[in-house]
Image: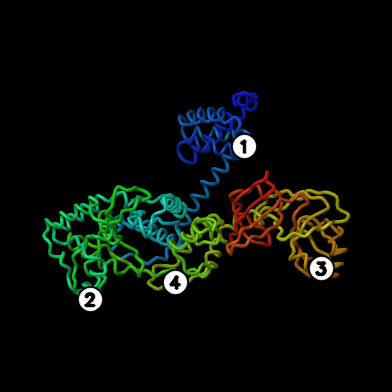
Amino acid sequence: MKMEQSSSSEAEEAEMREEALKYALLNALKYGEPDEKAVIKRILAEHPEWRKSARELRDFVREAVSDVAEMSKEEREAELMRLSPELAEELKGKERRKEEAKAEREEEEVKLPPLPNAERGKVVMRFAPNPNGAATLGSARGIVTNAEYARIYEGKFILRFDDTDPALKRPLPEAYDWYLEDCEWLLGAPPDEVVVASERIPLYYEHAVALIQKGAAYVCECPRETFKRLKDAKMACKHRELSVEENLERWERMLAGEYEEGEAVLRIKTDMRHEDPAMRDWVAFRILKREHPRVGDRFCVWPTLDFESAIEDHLLGITHILRGKDLQKSEGRQRFIYRYFGWKYPVTILWGKIKVAEFGKFSTSELRRRIERGEYEGWDDPRLPTIKALRRRGFQPEAIRKFLLSLGVSQADIAMSMKNLYAENRKIVDAFAPRYFFVHNPQKMTIKGFTEKTVKAQKHPERQEFREINTRNVVFISESDFRKLKVGMRIRLKFLCDVEVESVKPLVARVVSEKHAGESGEEGDGGGDHRRKPIIHWAPTESIEVHVKKPDGTVDEGLGEPLIASELGKVVQFERYAFVRIDAVSEGGKKVVAYFTH
């Protein structure tokens, strides 16, 4: 190993030093302070051959990070411009686009109705998911709408994880970070505050004791079936009239683990003759002797969602709640607690569910079960309605945000189609996505009278930017175009040449003109009128393998021009096919996996 490391030439060491400084500067200008691990990761992605000299590279990066940390922003910008003008310009371009996008969002007409009793600067909104899976479109609606109201009223947006059910809706450890990433991606900024309920259990215990002392809560040892019979009969159980002292003693026994699951619960004393059975002495705490993915086995008494949410909404100063109309009864139960403590309940706005036609009915719990069974590749499988999947497919946050805000906050359930989202996204990606040739189910064409040529093809119809495609006398066209060909038919291979078909099996054509190869021309049947020719795309002799994963679970296989491999992580348009995001490049750039966008 030492021999390998010491074998680095002086020229290679100099290049490594320069790359270390360049990417340390770029990282610092992007994120404020340079991150050593991120810089190393970026360099090794660009220069995998340097893995053999990882120790030397790490030393160079550490030195560069230290130097950059001492520079001002202006010094960093000047040094990056000296080392890599193209990276400096790219960074400036991204910053300009970010500012333009921000300005555009601020100018957009807000379609949300005004919040009742809202004061500018005092509005506090929250989105409170259970992190038992990745955020779906439904979750994104909650994130975007709550955050937008907070922005409109110059208030505060809180992301709160309601993760106090380690049994039925067991949290997924990775989901906490996923939600934070999705929030920042969708909103362009992190939430103003992040709260994790499972880390605040002692706060809920304090309020439970306060309610017991007020005579507003009691420990019930009735079996579930027994209490249900009493509740249905509008009768109180024998534990309801226990003294405060005895309830406190039983509460301490619950916390000490002396009860087993199901042997005792803490109930909020309400009205056993309430017309709605769901309001009658509801459960605030239950015993769950399960390990929690985030806090382990520290607690065996867990609050129900209604109790935890009621306490947190007050402690966090929530002013307005957007709540699904299917959770309307939660407010009724929670208001008992607010009355006992003399608190003011937040303004509540009910809204209906959304149903996406292309995905049918879905729930996070069901998606998780199906992923764990291996029916999907993961939470970013292109068949799923998760933000991770949409992001991987190449959807832009601005499109998702605008689309979701257009749904408003009506109580009506909304049946929607992804076509509306496609339309919003197309407006954005069409403006920047470079164009490339991808040929689905390729068919070989031999061109007579053609040797080898490098053509310039426009990367975007509205910009004077070009890509180069080199090919010899063999190209590939799509099967759908191949099926339309007949002997004697003339076609235009876009940007390349005009040819006449001499035979179909095998497919052989001869060059008839190279004069107008770069022009758009007109679509036609290619009969005797040479001005009317079908214009088709093609893949060159030295093509790369391309696989497109689609949202219906199928994969389109084909060939594409080699430069597609240079667009890793970016959205491009495969001409006459679709927008896609380049997801993976392997085999030295010879194989690409793309995700179908629309």
Depth check, mark 1 against mark 2: the one in front is 2
Q: Which is more N-terminal, label 4 or label 2?
A: 2
Q: CA distance from mark 2 to mark 4?
A: 30 Å
Q: Earlier in the sequence, mark 1 or mark 2?
A: 1
**Residue 48 badge:** 1
The answer to whether mark 2 and mark 3 are in CB contact below 8 A is no
Tell me the residue at 47%/41% (across/down).
31
CA–CA distance between discs 1 and 3? 49 Å
* Residue drawn at the location 40% of the way across and 55% of the way down: 131
Say which mark, if any, is on residue 526. Answer: 3
Q: Is residue 426 left or right of residue 333?
A: right
Left or right, 190 with reference to 393: left
In this view, the mark in front (2 or 3): 2
Amino acid at pointer 2: Glu
Q: How far is the residue under mark 1 from the one under mark 2?
A: 70 Å
- Secondary-structure class at tag 2: loop
Q: Position of residue 412 (x, y in %)?
A: 40, 73
Question: Mark 4 — residue?
Answer: 414
In this view of the protein, which residue sits in the foreground, 484 or 7?
Answer: 7
- Residue 166: x, y in percent? 35, 55
N-terminal of the pair, mark 3 or mark 4, is 4
Q: Secondary structure at mark 3?
A: loop
Q: CA distance from mark 2 to mark 3?
A: 78 Å
- Label 1: state its secondary structure: helix
**Residue 157 visible in this rendered orientation of the protein:** no
> Could you tell me the amino acid type at mark 1?
Pro
Q: Give the quadrant of the N terminus.
A: top right
Q: Earlier in the sequence, mark 1 or mark 3?
A: 1
